[in-house]
Image (spheres, helix red, strand yellow):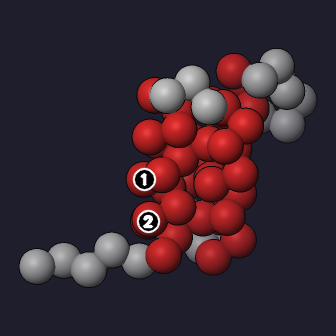
Amino acid sequence: MQQITLAEAYYNRGIANYFLENFEGALEDFNEALQINPNNTKFLIARSIIQSVLGAIEEA
């Protein structure tokens, strides 16, 4: 069985928040995941999508 890292747990919660339309919560979760693993492309893309949804195009 594969172990989920803390960064992956934050990412997964961010995805759940996205589908619940809790975009601010999703952004917080993706930021937490990126603090743990700043070079993870999947986390960076997810955060960029949320930033776009929130209207922060420059940051995305």
**Rounded to the nearest whole Å, what is the CA distance between mark 1 and mark 2?**
6 Å
At a point 53% along the width and 47% down the height, the residue shown is 14
What percent of the width, then of the height, locates residue 26?
A: 62, 42
Quadrant position of the C terminus in the picture = top right
Query: Residue lying furthest left in this view?
Result: 1
Q: Tell me if residue 23 comes above or below residue 10 in the rendering.
A: above
| Total numbered labels | 2
What percent of the width, then of the height, locates residue 22?
A: 62, 31
Task: Indicate the secondary structure of the residue bearing disc 1.
Answer: helix
Quadrant position of the N terminus in the picture = bottom left
Mark 1 touches mark 2? (CB < 8 Å)? yes
At a point 70% along the width and 71% down the height, the residue shown is 35
Tell me if I can see residue 53 in this picture: yes
Query: What residue is pinned by disc 1?
Result: 12
For the residue carrying disc 1, how many other residues have a C-alpha within 10 Å: few (<14), some (14-19), or many (20+)?
A: some
Q: Amino acid at mark 1?
A: Asn
Query: What residue is pinned by disc 2?
Result: 8
Left or right, residue 41 beside residue 8: right
Asked where in the image residue 31 lies, by quadrant, the reply is bottom right
At a point 49% along the width and 28% down the height, the residue shown is 20
